[in-house]
Amino acid sequence: MTAKSASEITRSPTTEKEHFDARSRMEELREQIRYHNYHYYVLDDPEITDAEWDTLFQELKELEETHPEFVTPESPTQRVGAPPQEAFGIVEHREPLLSLGNAFDGDELRNWHRRAASLADRTDFALVTEPKIDGLAIALVYENGVLAQAGTRGDGRRGEDVTPNVRTIASAPLRLRGPSPAQFEVRGEVYIPKARFEEMNTERAQRGEPLFANPRNAAAGALRQLDPNVTAVRPLALAIYQLGWAAGTAPSTQWETMAWLREMGFPTTPDADRHLGLEETIVACEAWIPRRDSLPFDMDGVVVKVNEFAIQRQLGIIGREPRWAIAFKFPPSEATTLLTRIGVNVGRTGSLNPYAILEPVHVGGATVKLATLHNEDDIRRKDIREGDTVVVRRAGEVIPQVVGPILSRRPPRRRRWRMPKRCPACHTPVVRPEGEAMAYCVNPTCPAQVQRQLEHFVNRAAMDIDGLGEETIADLLENELITDAADLYRLRKSRKALLSLRGYKEKKVDKLLASIEASKERPLAAVIFALGIRHIGSEVAAILAQHFGHIDAIATARREELAAIDGIGPVIADSVVTWFAGKRNRAVIRKLRRAGIRLEEIGGGAREGPLAGGQFIVTGRLEALTRNQAEAALKRLGGSVGGGVSKKTTALIVGEAPGSKLQRAQELDIPIWDEARLLALLREHRLDPAPSRPLASGSILAALRPRRRI
Ligand code: IVH
């Protein structure tokens, strides 16, 4: 083909001119594409749209197809297409790739600095901080401005030649901009941004392919592909953090080197910073910790480097770790451990919630023994089996998750996990409604369900009964002092029996009985919430209380009537109707009534205080108070609090991001208050805005704990 084109050139002068034009147009296009890549990947400031970039790229591709003799290996079109290899070649690193020592807190950084300062005989040297992106180290050699070789870390001296793979990484420059040393090496990290990782796993799940455990594993898999065409479709990214070696002159500090490399077109580690003092550096390192989960990449620490190369040389290397740099490590948020067993916990509504029992492992600053497994489908999708070594992740949220098994470490003959056919607490056959992911125990007297219901009943947003933790509830159930929530109000008569239980002293018993007594005064909304009806959270409970004013009115309301209320849909309506139709549930209401629980909303006149007779609604996120605290404060001021905005509403207390209630209030001309106004009222009446008391049990974490007695 090339020969034929060459003969054409000699044959026809016009064709020769055409060739010349095509060739210069191709150069021009490559130049433009490189320029725009630089703006996109390095400066993070694109000048053209993706579509415009595509047009340039397409034109170049077409020209290269017609004139293959002018295709250069560093052309932007040549990132893909290299044939698969049998095995990786070896690259010898001219200078070894080093490791980093770790510091786990400020004091360890101070120790490191003290040592460096004493060796350098000065304390005033500048330090650079860079995120330690959690990917794979790569060393890139450039010759005459063109990418010549890419090697993995390997053992530090010899790595694998992954040049064709690295060429497929869009942000890895194939040809540099402007002047560069004739030969030099840069080092950096190859990684997959978190968002790309999630997309990739979602697509894999849709195709029924196994999922990657984390971005790092996915990046490692992609980089070590023998077929670069597979690497090309994986969303790898590059961040350069070091100049390995260079033939020719280079800047004399880390900070300037990074700016210099950026000029050449390298994407360097984002968010690097330079500091004059150590204490300022420590503050900078610690400031990364809370930001960690919101970053676009996984990072496992901050690298602190001495800025000046002259001092770096003075400090030298000990073993394989430089004395001039250290990694400030975050508490890891992922760890591997053995999953010994999959347990099933029965929820308040009878839902069967599988959880993993783990060999205790330290992750994200806490010891984890249990992790949620969501439901049977999720376990199957991730193919988690008992006896697997699994990756456990603890992100910002409290409940640890099992990311997935490490299949290479699965012992032989492990069977897939199945949801038990019977409830683990009461042995009633399990039901999984069609279309639902959850399986349920449908026995309303299931002891596990009753325990969970009681935990919910006493929690702070519900009946707010102090001194009734998980274990106390279990004691009461086990000793048959209660069988349901309403029985709590008969405990007064069992004072003697209570005192005979181990560890139940007078003080404890009296406190408990007093707290139960006080709960009789809880507002109707709290009582409705306490009943634990599916889909009825405290907000919906407040809407129902305000709309109906009495539990009997709710109990006899028709489905359509309920569904027509603002804030209540057909699902909630169904749930309410079904609950009140239950014989056992109706018996609980009767018992509560007999016990003297207030089952109606108190009228305005019955209250005292500056807001007596007023109806208030809190919406949006307040700054100083939680929603519950604000509502409690309004009540202490004599107001009533509830649900939907109507003409009867006295005022709407508005926080940040208020939503539709604000709009409705404005339409109805309802006065709008801010939090400051409520706080001022509280101050004026010498009321504590937020009396503190920890939440009672019944938290999600409590639900995750396996039960001892049932
Ligand atoms: S400097 C001599 N800077 O961390 C110093 N390393 O144990 C050599 N890493 O696998 C490394 N981000 O690939 C340095 N900003 C950064 C880094 C970084 C990630 C990785 C590196 C190596 C490990 C060092």
Image (cartoon, grey):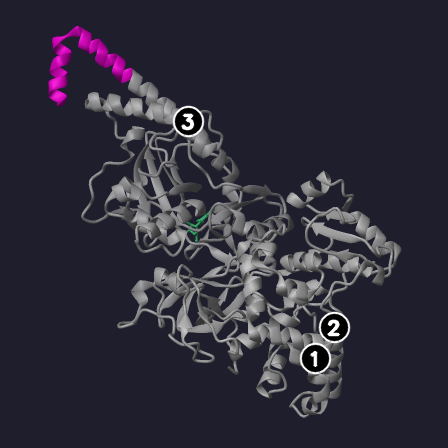
Marks 2 and 1 sit apart, C-alpha to C-alpha, by 9 Å
Earlier sequence position, callout 3 versus callout 2: 3
At a point 75% along the width and 83% down the height, the residue shown is 510
Q: Which mark is residue 520?
A: 2
Q: Residues within 10 Å of mark 3 (few under 14, many from 20)?
A: some
Label 1 is placed on what type of residue? Answer: Tyr
- The residue labelled by disc 1 is 489
Disc 3 and disc 2 in contact, CB within 8 angstroms: no
Which mark's residue is nearer the viewer, 3 or 2? 2
Which mark's residue is nearer the viewer, 1 or 3? 1
At a point 73% along the width and 55% down the height, the residue shown is 625
Judge by depth and name the residue closer to the eye, 47 or 514: 514
Earlier sequence position, callout 2 versus callout 1: 1
Count of numbered tags: 3
Q: Quadrant of residue 138?
A: top left
* Label 3 element class: helix
* Label 2 element class: helix
Disc 2 and disc 1 in contact, CB within 8 angstroms: yes
Q: Which residues are magenta?
A: 1-24
